[in-house]
Image (cartoon, rainbow, N blue to C red):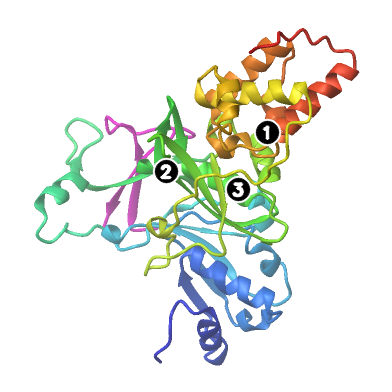
Amino acid sequence: PAFNFFEPIAILREIRENWVSWINATPSMFYKLVECVMIGKKRQLLSSLRYVFLGGEAMSLIPLIEWMQSEHCNAQLVNMYGTSECTDISTSYRILEPSRFLKEPVPIGKPLSNVQLYILDNSFRLLPVGVPGEIFIGGECLGSGYIGDTETTQKKFIYHSFSPGESQEKLYRSGDLAKWLETGDIEFLGRIDNHIKIRGYRIELGEIEFNLINHPGVKEAVVTLKSTCSDRQSLCAYIVPTSMDTFDVNELRSYLALHLPSYMVPLHLVPIPFIPLTPNGKADRTALPEPEQEKSTNSSPLRSEIDRRVAAVFYEALTGKNDFDEAQKKGFPGMGIDDNFFQFGGNSLNAASLLSKIQRDFSLEISFNELFKTPTIRGISDYITSEKKNHRPLYGVHRN
């Protein structure tokens, strides 16, 4: 039948009317189906399914767990991994204990019977359990190469032997990172090209996404690297909240600060109604909107001398300049008393600078966690005032 394959209602109708017993989809695609039946309270529309095979991208059970634990779920979920160059599927993992994987990644399982899978280092040496490396695939599943593209074929399909004198085996290098688990299963760690470096730190975008979707207010999340107006690269997270009305960006930022190092907390947390998909059902990062340049959301005046001194410290940390009084006359720099430091260009480096300047000017130590909880002029000023009332010495020097 002719229908839109990305229209959940149409797909659900086909599943119900034809008593479809198994489905093969990307996680992003299947999330939409489950969301549709849960919101519409029509869970029976998926009750005919006996097997759900999910692959093509990293999966999370958080968007699926309520449906999986309902009486209308009769399906066995299988997480799969593979590439088109290797006949699509190379490993599989049956999810028998879904609640276990609400706080840890779902493995991609063990290789299929006609597949040899290796995890190798940069010198093509086998890696032991727990050590990340690149996935190389061999066996009957391998394709011949890329038609009309000899250069890419030679780069991606290699011949290698693991011991002297052994015949060489044809392998496909996937560009994916993984590690062996003690159980003999494999844990997928993301694409090699998703491992980025910011300010000297190596970051895996998938780890940030995993922590985002573990937050109860987040249904889906995609993290990308964006260039700011100053040409600096910054992390940007696009979030589909469980509710747009109750989404609290500051609360989410504080949550991430407890679970990730400061340099992995995205500069931009952008709520969007849905994650755009490519024609094959994967998240389409190229279709995500550009994060807007932050503007002040309030015009509340500075309330006290401490407010003014904290504002001067914010300004110095964000701009590297020490001319706050002059800048204030010109309307410093568009930031209000309740605006978020991190949404105005704050990152791990200038956050560290901010904390050291607060210690310098107020003789008071503030932790990163405290800054993430109250990343505003008002919040830091109130914190300092509270500490002062509790008899913490504040020997700040008035700076002009």
Q: Mark 1 against mark 2, which lies toward the viewer?
A: 1
Q: Position of residue 170 (x, y in %)?
A: 20, 48
Res 315 seen here = yes
Q: Is residue 36 left or right of residue 283?
A: right
Identify whether 65 is placed above or below 319.
below
Q: Position of residue 263 (x, y in %)?
A: 53, 30
Amino acid bearing label 3: Leu
Residue at 37% from the left image edge and 61% from the top image edge: 89
**SS under mark 2:** strand
The quadrant of the rendering that contains the C terminus is top right
Nearer-the-camera pick, 38 or 320: 320
Q: Which residues are magenta?
A: 112-141
Identify whether 260 is placed above or below 61.
above
Cα distance, mark 3 to mark 2?
18 Å
Amino acid bearing label 1: Pro
Q: Which of disc 2 and disc 1 is earlier in sequence?
A: 2
Nearer-the-camera pick, 64 or 162: 64
Cα distance, mark 1 to mark 3?
19 Å
Q: Which of disc 2 and disc 3 is earlier in sequence?
A: 3
Q: Which residue is mark 1?
A: 375
Based on the picture, tell me whether residue 45 belongs to the magenta stretch: no
Mark 2 surroundings: few (<14), some (14-19) or many (≥20) residues within 10 A = some
Residue at 65% from the left image edge and 12% from the top image edge: 399
Q: Which residue is mark 2?
A: 226
Q: Which residue is mark 3?
A: 212
Based on the picture, tell me whether residue 136 belongs to the magenta stretch: yes
Q: Mark 3 against mark 2, which lies toward the viewer?
A: 2
Q: Which of disc 3 and disc 1 is earlier in sequence?
A: 3
Q: Position of residue 83 (x, y in %)?
A: 33, 57
Q: Mark 1 against mark 3, which lies toward the viewer?
A: 1
Q: Is residue 223 left or right of residue 49?
A: left
